[in-house]
Image (cartoon, rainbow, N blue to C red):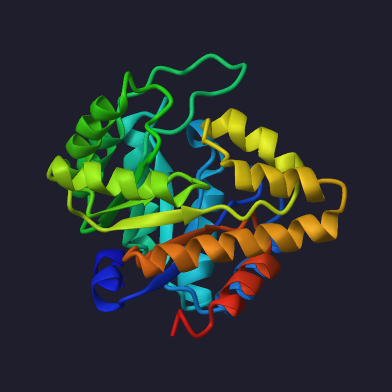
Amino acid sequence: MKISNILKSREITVSCELFPPKEGAVLGNVQKVVKEIARLNPSFMSITYGAGGAGSHNTTQIAHEIQNINGITALAHLTCIGSKKDDIIRTLKELKDKNIENILALRGDLPQNKPLLHGDYKYASELTEEIHKNGDFCVGGACYPEGHPESANLQKDIEYLKVKVESGCSFLTTQMFFDNNILYNFMFRLLKNGVDVPVIAGIMPITNAKQVERIFKLSGTALPPRFKAIVDRFADNPDAMKQAGIAYATEQIIDLIANGINHMHIYTMNKPDIAKNIMGNLSEIFK
């Protein structure tokens, strides 16, 4: 089923994100994770894509596991930075052959400590157009409530995002955020600029204090004082930090739904127990 139709047909949706094993690694562990999360019956499950196309076969294979083995709609990530057109078309054919019809089109992160190979695409909007030329796919895009780190300012970021939507993105999934007011302000700016596709809120449960520094470096997202206080208090108690992180993510989702944001995407970090706890906390809300 196309995700655009899922978002229309269900008042509240909750989806989960996984990442594939590294290229050359066995799939067994991730297959087990897929099965455990699929038992929670999320609205759909997404599978990420390796930087520069590394691990693309694993992404396709896990998407197949999600949808054709476990019966949950799959959303396959696809990045284009440093990619050649022939490679993108080959991946699209593989996805089509496995009946995967949902793709999250991303530029992708610049490779760390490696030269960037010359590719045929510079922006996610170009990839979105390419996808639509090669099949009847439902295409989603990423958005950054606090602005993309490379954007000159928030307004420019919204303008680029509008180009992405006009190129064929039918829904958007946000980067993680920890202050809901940031998302509410972002939604207002989107509507003001004529961007009115469904927005799925990306929720990252922080269950390990070591995640905080890494996440801040990668995304630059703001950490509200209330969240910092939780980390300061429970950083040295792993079990308490895990419980507090799940509680914080749960509370975020409750507040979002109460304020009319009905589509959630949980970044599971391949930990089914975290997704299970959050969805269990919200079992009546997610009915």
Which residue is at 23% across, 41% downward?
189
| Depth check, front residue: 115 or 209 | 209
In the rendering, at what x and y percent does residue 194 appear?
12, 45
Which residue is at 54% across, 60% downward?
62
Quadrant position of the C terminus in the picture: bottom left
Residue 77 at least partly seen: yes
Quadrant location of residue 260?
A: bottom left
Left or right: 192 with respect to 228?
A: left
Which residue is at 39% across, 30% downward?
148
Which residue is at 59% across, 21% downward?
112
Quadrant position of the N terminus in the picture: bottom left
Up/down of 54 relative to 18, above or below:
above
In the rendering, at what x and y percent does residue 61 appear?
53, 58
Q: Which residue in the rendered view is the most extreme toward the right?
A: 236
Left or right: 53 with respect to 94?
A: right
Up/down of 285 relative to 217, above or below:
below
Quadrant location of residue 82?
A: top left
Residue 63 at least partly seen: no
In the rendering, at what x and y percent does residue 58 appear?
56, 51
Left or right: 232 with respect to 228?
A: right
In the rendering, at what x and y percent does residue 68 appear?
46, 73
Up/down of 117 relative to 67, above or below:
above
